[in-house]
Image (cartoon, rainbow, N blue to C red):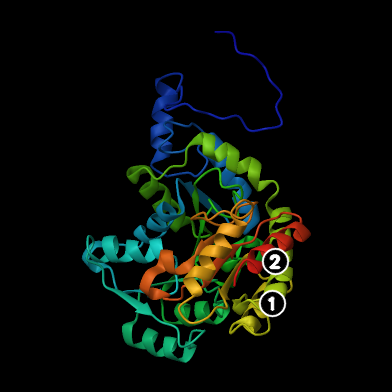
Amino acid sequence: MKKIKVHSTMVPIYRDAGFHLINTGTSIKAFKDELDHHRAPENYIYSRYRNPTVVAAEEQLMKLEQCNWALLTQSGLSAIDLALSIFQQGKKTGPWLFFSEIYGGTNSFIDRVLIFRRGLDVRRFYPTGGSYDLGELKKMLDEVKPALVYFECVSNPMVVVADCERIISLAKKSGAVVIVDNTFATPYLWRPLEMGADIVVHSATKYLAGHGDLTAGVVCGNDPRMEKDAIEYRKYIGHMLSPDDAYRLGANLKTFELRMKRHCDNAFKLAGMLAAHDKIEQVHYPGLASHSTHEDAKKLFKGKGFGGMITFDLKAAPGKKLEAAEKFIAAVAEDIPLVPTLGNADTTLLHVESVWGDKYPMPGLIRLSVGIEEYEHLETVIQNGLANID
């Protein structure tokens, strides 16, 4: 078939399962080079190994995270599995320490996979009140001597901002590998690798993709040995993002920083409005001086914003909070749907108790993922929703 020469400004979608290796010489070289696990190989072999459309999106993410390598996977949880699994060494694996206030799916993965199926020695570090006591963390690090420490910069759903710089410093001094889930903060607000973290993971489904139209995860780092281990693990387990999703992610990433600024600006204004509203019991947002980790957020994010997530508790008579939540959710549903994800261009919400159950037995608690709509419209929708509460 005659090849058509096209001058495109976009990276093509390479849907090839396997790539044309031309002749035996190229084939020998390609498979020999594959032993070195290059992130962007000279000759692509098979799309489970690497794919040029995926590599192009990875290079966009490398610029955002200012890192030496980034590897895309098909979901945030597969990125977490990839990041953690490269440090598992059978019976030689030491204890791993996880902060408790992390994504519920990660906690379930810890319980059902790392502990139940893989038999790993996993410990958890819990907050005291609304923040982590890092004096207690140091004691735990000295006692447990974990091989790996894992935490989230901003917790879900209570948006607690960790003292990330000190946590990383304490963990590294104890000899642990540090992995940070930076999904909520994103590289727009903070880059963990610049403070000494070894690995950063994101659910790219959220703010990086930003439109609720694909699922993806990414693992980022600087160490070339970790990169090769991660490439090898991804190849054998099959945690590869599809070229179609990589293409759409690459297109969405072009507006990432513009979107994040708008998310942060809208959320900051909305949090202030909610905090002053007589139908609101409490607002959890690190941009408010009343938030338990406001000072940590100011120090870490350096004036860029405080993220796009707000959690607030509706005010209602005893025993009436669930009814109040149901009325609010119904009143705003046309503009703010209840959707089990976050980071979309459109504002969405979740009822916290319905999702987290006994962990947060607070029937009036709503988690709001603030979008990039016109702020005045968004405020009007929420004001009208609150007006429906008796």
Q: Quadrant of the C terminus?
A: bottom right
- Report whether residue 37 is seen: yes
Relative image position of residue 5 (x, y in whole percent): 67, 17
Q: Earlier in the sequence, mark 2 or mark 1?
A: 1
The residue pinned by badge 1 equals: 277
Q: Amino acid at mark 1?
A: His
| Mark 2 in CB contact with mark 1 (< 8 angstroms) | yes
Q: Nearer the viewer, residue 316 or 218?
A: 316
Relative image position of residue 140 (x, y in whole percent): 37, 86
How busy is the neighbourhood of tag 2: few (under 14 within 10 Å), some, or many (20 plus)? some
- Report whether residue 156 is seen: no
Relative image position of residue 110 (x, y in whole percent): 32, 65
Q: Amino acid at mark 2?
A: Gln
Q: Is residue 258 left or right of residue 96?
A: right
Q: Name, please, the residue furthest toward the front.
A: 390
- Relative to 262, residue 136 above or below: below
Relative image position of residue 107 (x, y in whole percent): 36, 66
How busy is the neighbourhood of tag 1: few (under 14 within 10 Å), some, or many (20 plus)? some
* Residue 275: quadrant of the picture: bottom right
Q: Nearer the viewer, residue 180 or 18?
A: 180
